Amino acid sequence: MDRPVVAGVDGSPASLAAAEEAAREAQLRDRPLHLVHGFLHPLGYGVPINPYDLGLPAPADTGQAMLEQAANDLADRWPGLRTEARQVAGGPGATLIEESRRAELVVVGSRGHGGFTGLLLGSVSGQVAAHAHCPVLVVRPADQPVPTRGPVLVGVDGSEPAELAVGYAADEAVRRGTELLLVHAAPADGAADSSGLPGTQPEALLDTAVAAARGSHPGLSVTGRTTRGTSPGQALVDASAEAALVVVGTRGRGGFTGLLLGSVSQAVVQHAHCPVLVAHPYRQGD
């Protein structure tokens, strides 16, 4: 299946920045780009005013014009990019989650309005981050150029979701031709190890992850870093200042507990200095 890269677009600067990054990802992955606008009825629902009218609300001409303009602009900057732009009747969260069933990647901005209100911090972002069927890329910060230089960063805690995140991060580093940086947040000396794994030393855990990444991606430059006395979220946020991308898992334990919905994920998604990739496994649906 030629899974597309999907970007939610509402005309806001943040969503257009996300579309630009989605175009870059589509070209890196040799995938088509789908620009999608989830439009609602003026009352806020994807249903018609008249309860006896079983038809769907008609797409707005202004929305279609916005999408076509965005697609044309991207085509000018990314020659050869295969682009499709369309409106979908329905709420933005549900629209992107449904699109994710057939997507290689879903890309959202850190702010939005209209059809994609609150993509990062509001209920829509929570829906997409929690229920997407493929990886989700959150493009932030919204008020600065998206960084293209620096390593791909990922947290290591010994959990299975973190291992998946490391694999995704290594793939991204290969695509971008850059270094992979693995970070483990260890407790201050004398405290229990934050991995939650009995008998596990931070250095041994990190060395194992570095060796696994090198083994699965020959030729990739992989560096491991252990931080002490710093919370996992803050460790990743601090390290993201020098990164082009930070990757987090959808679940975790110990040092990176609750990477998707807990305090660590909130810290990374809200405060990282670069885009954040939430490493959902690919699923066809429930």
Image (cartoon, helix red, strand yellow):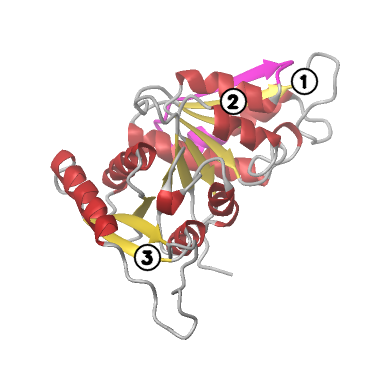
- The number of numbered discs placed on residues in the rendered structure image is 3
In screen coordinates, is 220 left or right of 231? Answer: left
Q: Residue at x 63, y 45 (%)?
A: 161
Which of the image's four quarters has the N terminus? bottom left
Of residues 283 and 120, the one nearer the viewer is 120
In screen coordinates, is 6 left or right of 243? Answer: left
Few, some or many C-alpha atoms within 10 Å of disc 1 (few <14, some 14-19, many ≥20)?
many
**Element at badge 2?**
helix
Q: For the residues marked 3 and 2, what is the alpha-carbon distance in whole angstroms?
A: 36 Å
Q: Is residue 1 visible?
A: no
Q: Name the front one of labels 2 and 1.
A: 2
* Identity, as a three-letter code, of the amino acid under mark 2: Leu
Q: Is residue 213 visible?
A: yes
* Identity, as a three-letter code, of the amino acid under mark 1: Pro
Q: Identify the disc placed on residue 236.
A: 2
Q: Name the front one of labels 3 and 1.
A: 3
Q: For the residues marked 3 and 1, what is the alpha-carbon distance in whole angstroms?
A: 48 Å
Residue found at the far top of this picture: 189
**Element at badge 3?**
strand
Q: Which residues are magenta?
A: 212-230
In screen coordinates, is 87 left or right of 260? Answer: left
- On the image, numbered disc 1 is attached to which residue? 187
Q: Earlier in the sequence, mark 3 or mark 2?
A: 3
Q: Quarter-wise, where is residue 232 in the image?
A: top right
Q: Identify the disc placed on residue 88.
A: 3
Of residues 127 and 229, the one nearer the viewer is 127
**Element at badge 1?**
loop
- Picture coordinates of residue 139 (x, y %)? 43, 37
259 over 283 or under it: above or below: above
Is residue 264 inside the magenta stretch? Answer: no
- Picture coordinates of residue 205 (x, y %)? 68, 29
Q: Residue at x 22, y 50 (%)?
A: 71
